[in-house]
Amino acid sequence: MSEADSNKDPLQTPASEPAHAAEPAKPVPSRPASSGGAKAVASLALLVGLGGMALGGYSYWQLQQLGAQEADRQASLQKADEQTRQLAAGNQQLAARLGRLEQLPSAAELDERRRLLATLQSDQQRLAGRVEQVLGASREEWRLAEAEHLLRMAMLQLSAMQDVKSAEMLVAEADLILQKQDDPSAYAARQKLLEGLEALRSLPQLDRTGLFLQLGALRGQSSQLSALAPEFVNGEAGPEDLGQSRWQRWLDELTRYVRVDFDASADVKPLLAGQTLGQVRLALSLAIEQAQWAVLNGNAEVYRQALQQASALISDHFSEDNGQARGLRERIDALAQREVEVQLPDLSSALKALQAYVEKREAPNETPAEPEMPEQEA
């Protein structure tokens, strides 16, 4: 083809020439052959992708296994380090024990110490037995001293207060102490104590406290007594009195202050007023107080004399018309008949018997010495 032909527009062809005559026909590939190659390529690509994914998963699993192995290795190393430290600490303890074992005494020293320990235990047992014996004896001596003190207190109650009930309780307690001793040699002392106890129980029961309080109540009533002085009432002057002389009126006025009684058969009671009444009350209170003292001391003679004096004071200075004074006198006369004194038993023989028993127990007795225990050998 020439250059002029090449510069021509390929689209401009002669009308007379057909279009297919200008270019040669190209071969067209068949459609079935091209579709089979694409499927093969796609399958290959899929296989390659699956292989890559399998390779990646396997690589990830290998990495996980390596990481776990590394963690196990680290744990094993830490455990090994811990065991190493424990072994080092055990070695130190073992070394310390070995050092202490080197300081332990020898076999001869151990035998000597065993012998000394056995001797000490033996001495301790003997000492404990002796202490128990001494304490037991001291306890019994103390109880006997208590019984003697109780008996002395009973004698004091009888002599000072004449309190039979308290003395009976004290003697009974002293006898109970001797009973608990369970000693045949205390028979004589117990016999004297029981004789005194039965003598106290046979005495009549005197209520000294109640009698003392009753007399105290009467003292309070005596301070409230008052005299019944006669009263004279002047009436109005009548018509017949107007003609009386001056001397007659003066005599009538005088009879208001002075009364003359010519009846010798009746008792004449002095009229009390002011300071005289207070003095009689004081004398009556002192007489009753003296009777109280006699009750506490068991003096029957003083008791009756004091109450008789109190009754005489009421009879001499107060009228029978005074109901309060009459009732007080009757009560005093009734109390004057009460017994305030009894014949008390003598407990000195019981005290002497108890002292003799205590002295007999405290007498030194020769006791054989205890044989020493042989030393125990290891």
Image: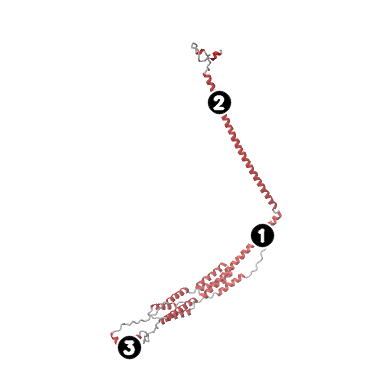
* Secondary structure type for disc 3: helix
Badge 1: residue crowd in 10 Å (few <14, some 14–19, many ≥20): few
Residue 45 is labelled as: 2
Residue type at the position of mark 2? Ala
Provide the residue designation for mark 1.
Answer: 120
Residue type at the position of mark 3? Arg
Which color scheme is applied?
A: secondary structure
Measured as percent of width and height from the top left, residue 368 is found at 66, 66
When the figure is inspected, residue 20 is found, relative to residue 240, above or below; the finding is above
Q: As rendered, which of 199 and 301 lies closer to the eye?
A: 301
Residue shown at 29% from the left, 86% from the top: 242
Look at discs 1 and 3 and give the one toward the viewer: 3
In which quadrant of the rendered view does residue 238 lie? Answer: bottom left
- How far is disc 2 from disc 3 in space, using C-alphas? 182 Å
Provide the residue designation for mark 3.
Answer: 246
Residue 195 shows up from this direction: no
Comes first in the chain, label 1 or label 2 = 2
Badge 2: residue crowd in 10 Å (few <14, some 14–19, many ≥20): few
Do the residues under discs 1 and 3 have CB atoms within 8 angstroms?
Answer: no
